Image: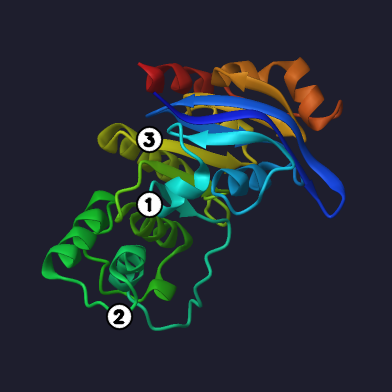
C-alpha cells in the first residue's frame, strides 16, 4: 500500500505560486528525502500533507484517506524545523516525551503507569536512557532532537515527518542522527519523510529522494539526484555538490 499519494498538487499563497503540478507516490515503510534550495516549497509540501495548508489544485491522500482524517487518527508524528519550547522552561526530557501523548490523553487526564513506561521505552529506543530526568534545555542540540523524535513517536504514528531535523547539529552528530532514523525505520516499519538542505548527506540514508524547486525535477533512487543535469535544474549552473567516493560506497552498503 502507498502511504502517500500526491496528484497534480499546486499551492498558491498570498497570490504567489509556491508549488506546481507535484506528483509523488511513496510506498509504506519507505524513507523519502525532500531536497531543494531555500524557498523551494519543501516545508509547504509537508504542511499540505499534514493538512496545515490547503492546496489550490490537485489532491493528497494518506493511506488512501484525506489528510484531515489521518490527522484525527494520529497517523502522523511531526518534528517541525523549530521546536516551540522555551529551553528555559524547567521541563525534563521525560516531560517533553510525555507531551507527545497529551493529544490522546487530553490536557487534564493524568498519565497512567503504562503510559509513563511507554515514554521511558521510547527514550531507551532513541539511545537516551539515563537522560530522562535532565532538563531539556541542558541537553545538546543532537540530544534535544533525539528527545523530540521520541516525543513524535510515543503516540505510535505510522508516518514520521521531519523538517530540517539536523539544523544546529554538528557533522558527526548529523551522521549519528541519520543512522538513528534509519534504524527506527527498519525496527518500527515507519514511513519517514524528511526535508533537508544537505543533498550530499541524505543520499546515503534515504530510499527515495525528491528534488523540489516549485516543481518536481526528480523523484527516484537517491544517487539519481546527483546527476549534473538534475542539480543544475535544481540549484542553477554554478553549484558544487561535494561528494566523496566513500559516501557513494556507504549508499550501497546501507541499501543491502
Task: Count all numbered tags in the image, as a single digit.
Answer: 3
Q: Is residue 12 visible?
A: yes
Res 197 label: none
Q: Is residue 108 above or below residue 177?
A: below
Q: Give the class, few, some or many, for how many residues have Cα within 10 Å of label 1's Cα (few <14, many ≥20).
A: some
Quarter where residue 187 is shown: top left
**Quadrant housing the C terminus:** top left
Return the disc, 3 or 2, that comes first in the chain's sequence.
2
Q: Residue at x 86, y 29 (%)?
A: 238
Residue matched to label 1:
74
Packing grade of label 2 (10 A; few <14, some 14-19, many >=20) is: few
Q: How far is the residue under mark 1 from the one under mark 2? A: 19 Å
3 vs 2, front mark: 2
Report whether residue 171 is seen. no
Q: Is residue 74 left or right of residue 16?
A: left
State left or right for residue 9 relative to residue 209. Answer: right
Name the residue rendered at 52%, 24% in the picture: 208
User: Residue beneath label 2, please?
Assistant: 108
Q: Is residue 72 above or below residue 213?
A: below
Residue 171 position, x and y percent, is 53, 46
Secondary structure of residue under mark 2: loop
Q: Position of residue 45 (x, y in %)?
A: 64, 42
State the image quarter where residue 113 is shown. bottom left
Quadrant position of the N terminus in the picture: top left
Quadrant hosting residue 168: bottom right
- Using the numbered discs, state the Cα–Cα distance from disc 3 to disc 2 in whole angstroms: 35 Å
Secondary structure, mark 1, is: loop
Q: Which residue is mark 3?
A: 182
Location of residue 25 with respect to 134 vertically, above or below: above
Amino acid at each position: 500500500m502507498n502511504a502517500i499519494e500526491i496528484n497534480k498538487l499546486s499551492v498558491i499563497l498570498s497570490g504567489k505560486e509556491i508549488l506546481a503540478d507535484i506528483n509523488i507516490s511513496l510506498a509504506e515503510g519507505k524513507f523519502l528525502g525532500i531536497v531543494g534550495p531555500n524557498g523551494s516549497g519543501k516545508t509547504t509540501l509537508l504542511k499540505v500533507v499534514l493538512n496545515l495548508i490547503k492546496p489550490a489544485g490537485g489532491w493528497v491522500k494518506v493511506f488512501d484517506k484525506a489528510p484531515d482524517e489521518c490527522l484525527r487518527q494520529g497517523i502522523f508524528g511531526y518534528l517541525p524545523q523549530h521546536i516551540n519550547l522555551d529551553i528555559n522552561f524547567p521541563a525534563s526530557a521525560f516531560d517533553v516525551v510525555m507531551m507527545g501523548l497529551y493529544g490522546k490523553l487530553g490536557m487534564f487526564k493524568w498519565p497512567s503507569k503504562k503510559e509513563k513506561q511507554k515514554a521511558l521505552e521510547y527514550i531507551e529506543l532513541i539511545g537516551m536512557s539515563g537522560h530522562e530526568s535532565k532538563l531539556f534545555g541542558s541537553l545538546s542540540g543532537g540530544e534535544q532532537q533525539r528527545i523530540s523524535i521520541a516525543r513524535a513517536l510515543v503516540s505510535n504514528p505510522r508516518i514520521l515527518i521531519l523538517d530540517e531535523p539536523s539544523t544546529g547539529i554538528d557533522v558527526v552528530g548529523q551522521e549519528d542522527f541519520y543512522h538513528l532514523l534509519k534504524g527506527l525505520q527498519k525496527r518500527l516499519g515507519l514511513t519517514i519523510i524528511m526535508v533537508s538542505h544537505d543533498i550530499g548527506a541524505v543520499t546515503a540514508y534515504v530510499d527515495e529522494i525528491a528534488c523540489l524547486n516549485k516543481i518536481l525535477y526528480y523523484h527516484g533512487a537517491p544517487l539519481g539526484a546527483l546527476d549534473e543535469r538534475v542539480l543544475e535544474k535544481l540549484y542553477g549552473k554554478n553549484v558544487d555538490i561535494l561528494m566523496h567516493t566513500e559516501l557513494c560506497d556507504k549508499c550501497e552498503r546501507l541499501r543491502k
